[in-house]
Every structure is written in structure tokens, then in C-alpha cells.
Image: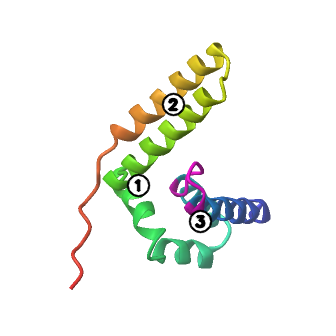
């Protein structure tokens, strides 16, 4: 079973890293999933992910406060608007657009009702 958790962690981490470069693919949810999987399979990779300077802080913010940073909320909103705009440009059927709009609005509602988390610490 540990091997399956490990593979799931690697796949999630890979998708999260791709998401850092591809605008419509989320990064943090995949990193949260990777941390969850690594907690059950690899202490070393779990600790590395939590201590990572880029991926660690959002994971800690989510675990401690269920928080999503304001910057991430804005980025998610812009990405969702871009995805929906693409559907409009591609002239997707009205029923599909309605379903997509409903799902995306629910996602936005979830994201924007999460706390912003602590402000970033100033660097000296």
C-alpha cells in the first residue's frame, strides 16, 4: 500500500510542478495531495515538501487555518475566467456552458470564503 501512496505522491507533485508553469492547471491542490500521499509513504519527501520555500507555506497555511492567500485567490479567479472565456470563444453548447458556469461559480465561492491566512513575513 505504501508504494501506491508513494506513486500517488509523485504523480501529484509532478502535476503540481507542471501547474506552476501552465496557467489553467492548479499547483497548490496537487501539492496538498502530494503531502497527504507522502505522509503515508515517505517521511523524507513529506518533510522536504513541507520545508520547500515555495510549496511549503501554502501547505502550512491550508493545514493550520484552511487559508488560501489573497494572491492565489486572484490568480485562481483569473484562470477560471480565462477557462470560461475560452469556452465562450469556442462556442460550446449552451447546456455545457450552464453546467460549467455553475461548477466554476461554486469553486469561486469556495475559494473566496476561505480565510486569507497570515500576511507574509517581512524580509530583513
- Residue, far top: 95
Q: Nearer the viewer, mark 2 or mark 1?
A: 2
Q: Where is residue 47 drawn, in percent x and y?
A: 53, 76
Kindly identify which numbered label has been placed on residue 62.
1
Q: Which residue is mark 3?
A: 39
Q: Nearer the viewer, mark 3 or mark 2?
A: 2
Residues rendered magenta in the picture: 20-28
Q: x, y percentage for residue 2?
A: 75, 64
Q: Quadrant of the N terminus?
A: bottom right
Question: Callout 3: helix, strand or loop?
Answer: helix
Disc number for residue 104: 2
In screen coordinates, is 91 left or right of 59?
right
Q: Which mark is residue 25?
A: none
Q: Residue 23: within the magenta?
A: yes
Which of marks 1 and 2 precedes in the sequence?
1
What is the quadrant of the C terminus in the image? bottom left
Which residue is found at the position 31% from the left and 52% from the top? 70
Q: List x then y, in percent, for residue 54.
A: 46, 71
At mark 2, the secondary structure is helix
Amino acid at each position: 500500500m505504501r508504494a501506491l501512496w508513494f506513486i500517488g505522491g509523485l504523480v501529484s507533485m509532478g502535476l503540481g510542478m507542471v501547474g506552476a508553469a501552465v496557467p489553467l492547471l492548479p499547483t497548490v491542490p496537487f501539492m496538498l495531495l502530494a503531502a497527504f500521499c507522502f505522509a503515508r509513504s515517505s517521511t523524507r519527501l513529506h518533510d522536504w515538501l513541507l520545508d520547500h520555500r515555495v510549496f511549503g507555506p501554502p501547505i502550512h497555511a491550508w493545514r493550520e487555518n484552511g487559508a488560501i492567500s489573497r494572491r492565489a485567490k486572484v490568480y485562481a479567479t483569473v484562470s477560471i475566467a480565462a477557462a470560461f472565456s475560452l469556452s465562450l470563444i469556442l462556442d460550446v453548447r449552451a447546456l455545457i456552458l450552464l453546467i460549467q458556469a455553475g461548477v466554476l461559480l461554486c469553486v469561486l465561492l469556495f475559494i473566496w470564503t476561505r480565510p486569507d491566512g497570515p500576511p507574509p513575513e517581512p524580509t530583513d
